[in-house]
Image (cartoon, rainbow, N blue to C red):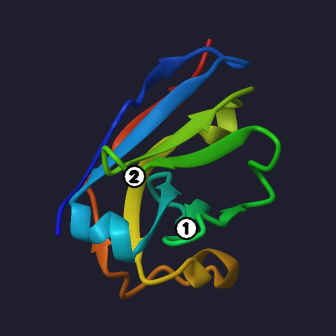
Amino acid sequence: VQLQASGGGLVQPGGSLRLSCAASAFTSDYYAIGWIRQVSGKEREGVSCISSGDGTTYYADSVKGRFSISRDNAKNIVYLQMNSLKSEDTAVYYCVADPDCTWLTSNYYYGLYSWGKGTLVTVSS
C-alpha cells in the first residue's frame, strides 16, 4: 500500500495551499484517508479525515472552517484544501490510511494502516 503526499510549500499568512494524497485503488476504496501534521519536537496532531463509502469528513477544531478535505474516486486522490493559513499551520503533513477515522476523534495515531512520506508546509511572511 502506497500513499504519496504532495503540494507543500511556502505560503504567506492568509494564503492557501492544496495538498494531494495519491493512493492505490485498493486503499482508497476500502480505507479512510486523512492528514496528520507534526512540528519537530512537538506532538502529532490529527488534522482531517474522510471516510470510505459515504465520504463523511472530520476536522480538528483548529482547522474547522479553514480546511476542506475531499476525494476524487476516479483518480484515487484525496485533497486537503487549506485556506486562511496561519503560522501555526506550519508543519510536515502526512497522509494516512486506516479502516476508519476514529484515530482523529480519539487523537490516537499509532498502528495506523499506512503512512505516506510527509510534505512540508511553511506559513511565513
Which residue is denoted by mark 1 in the rendering? 43
Q: Is residue 23 above or below residue 99?
A: above
Image-quadrant location for residue 55? bottom right
Which residue is denoted by mark 2 in the rendering? 73
Q: In this view, does 18 lie above or below 118?
A: above
Q: Label 1, secondary structure: give it.
A: loop
Nearest the eye: 60 or 20:
20
Q: Residue at x 55, y 67 (%)?
A: 43
Using residue 50 as the reference point, say whether residue 86 is left or right of it: right
Residue 99 in the image: x percent, y percent?
Answer: 43, 84
Residue 83 in the image: x percent, y percent?
Answer: 69, 28
Nearest the eye: 20 or 44:
20
Q: Assess whether mark 1 and mark 2 are in contact (beta carbons under 8 angstroms).
A: no
Q: Which residue is drawn at 48% across and 42% down?
A: 79
Amino acid type indicated by mark 2: Asn
Crowding near the residue tagged with mark 2, few <14, some 14–19, many ≥20 C-alpha atoms within 10 Å: few
Image-quadrant location for residue 13? top right
Nearest the eye: 59 or 51:
51
Checking the image for residue 3, the label placed there is none
Q: In this view, does 102 lie above or below 21?
A: below
Q: Quadrant of the C terminus?
A: top right
Q: Label 2, secondary structure: give it.
A: loop
Residue 50 in the image: x percent, y percent?
Answer: 56, 63
Amino acid type indicated by mark 1: Glu
Using residue 77 as the reference point, say whether residue 18 is left or right of it: right
Using residue 105 as the reference point, say whether residue 30 is left or right of it: left
Using residue 62 as the reference point, say whether residue 35 is left or right of it: left
